[in-house]
Image: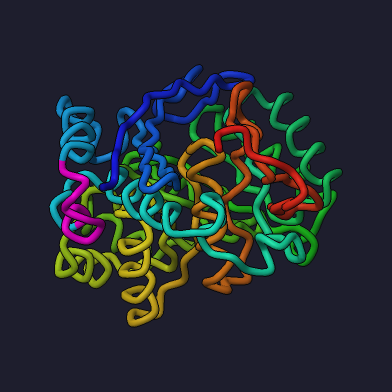
Amino acid sequence: MIVAKYVRYVLNFHRPAVTSREIMEVKETWYLFLEHDGKKGIGECGMLRGLSSDDRPDFEEKLQWVCDHIHMGKEELYQSLIEFPSIQFAIEQAFLSLEQEHPALLFPSDFTAGKVGIPINGLLWMANPKSLELQFERKVSNEFRCVKMKVGSNKLYEELRLLEQFRAQYGPDELEIRLDANGAYTVEEVQSKLEAFAPYHIHSIEQPIAPGQWDAMHELCQYSPIPIALDEELIGVFETDKKIALLEAIQPQFIILKPSFIGGFQGTDTWIQLAKEHNIGWWITSALESNVGLNAIAQYTYLLGNPMPQGLGTGTLYTNNIVSPLEVAQAHLWYRPEKNWDIF
């Protein structure tokens, strides 16, 4: 008989993480532990307060329900949790972990053997212009040639001045610049913002306006001088027919896939298949999980073979992250098999 329990864990940021929505000093997460005949499995519920569709008062009640009904098995549990995508993901992870020779090796590959790293972007968190300059210098000195800058909290002229400085040092063939607005702009102002950013050869901008404005987002995707990537727009879109309707109504250039927000591996597989059918690009991003969830996402992502830089560089954000073999070096995420986990 499989025995299940969950544990809440609070991750502490090295420094407050700032987006256009909020300032975060801590991040809650939940671990689902399974045990059967002496073997153990673990999965992470990476629900994010204020953003995840399963940020609901009954979230922990539902987690306890999962533990009480673990005998139902992975597939039946997964299908019964459509409105709780982060718990779906934890269930996928935990059962897969339980089945493996080592609970951390969900998808053994050249990545988990330490032979190959996953290219990632360097994230520039929202901060004052001087701090953004310093973040940028650290990223490029560590060989990053793709950076993602969060925009929308500073004055536009300050952000443009930073982009001008970046481009003065590195041309578009040397450095890819992505922007992430987290829905910061109004429909009325967004076009002028995009036109202001465009001369700096921006690869893409994530979620320039708040989600749920399909007609306005469609217009942006048609006429924007910068390719548009949907992020928050995908949250809470559960049924396949609604996913198809969203993609056909908006017709974005890219979608950003966060497994904790969209139903884990199965949910991500569905979005990728639909993106391919609609000629839409995609990449995968972590959603501030601890190293447990990041490990699962990274191993899965490697097998997909997407050569674009992925958004998987969040493992160093916390003072009390789970010690793991994951390491960022030379603008790649690596798995160092000679290093140990401290949770198993």
Asked if the magenta segment contains residue 72, the reply would be yes
Q: Quadrant of the C terminus?
A: top right
Query: Residue at the spot x=28%, y=50% of the render?
Result: 88
Question: Which is nearer the eye, 25 or 179?
Answer: 25
Q: Residue 241: x, y in percent?
A: 15, 69
Colour scheme of the picture: rainbow
Query: Residue at the spot x=44%, y=61% of the render?
Result: 224
Do we see residue 115 in this rendering?
Answer: yes
Asked if the magenta segment contains residue 79, the reply would be no
Q: Main secondary structure of the magenta part?
A: helix
Q: Residue 29: x, y in percent?
A: 40, 30
Q: Residue 199: x, y in percent?
A: 64, 56
**Left or right of 147 in this view: 51:** left
**Left or right of 164 in this view: 203:** left
Q: Which residues are magenta?
A: 69-78
Question: Which is nearer the eye, 341 or 147?
Answer: 341
Question: Which is nearer the eye, 117 or 129?
Answer: 117
User: Is 189 drawn above or below residue 80 in the view shown?
Assistant: above
**Left or right of 36 in this view: 237:** left
Q: Residue 240 falls in which quadrant of the image?
A: bottom left
Tally the marks. 0
**Left or right of 187 in this view: 71:** left
Do we see residue 82 in this rendering?
Answer: no
Query: Residue at the spot x=38%, y=61% of the render?
Result: 265
Query: Residue at the spot x=31%, y=44% of the render?
Result: 86
Give the residue furthest to the front: 37
User: Is 189 drawn above or below residue 281 in the view shown?
Assistant: above
Q: Residue 302: x, y in percent?
A: 58, 66
Q: Residue 309 falls in which quadrant of the image?
A: bottom right
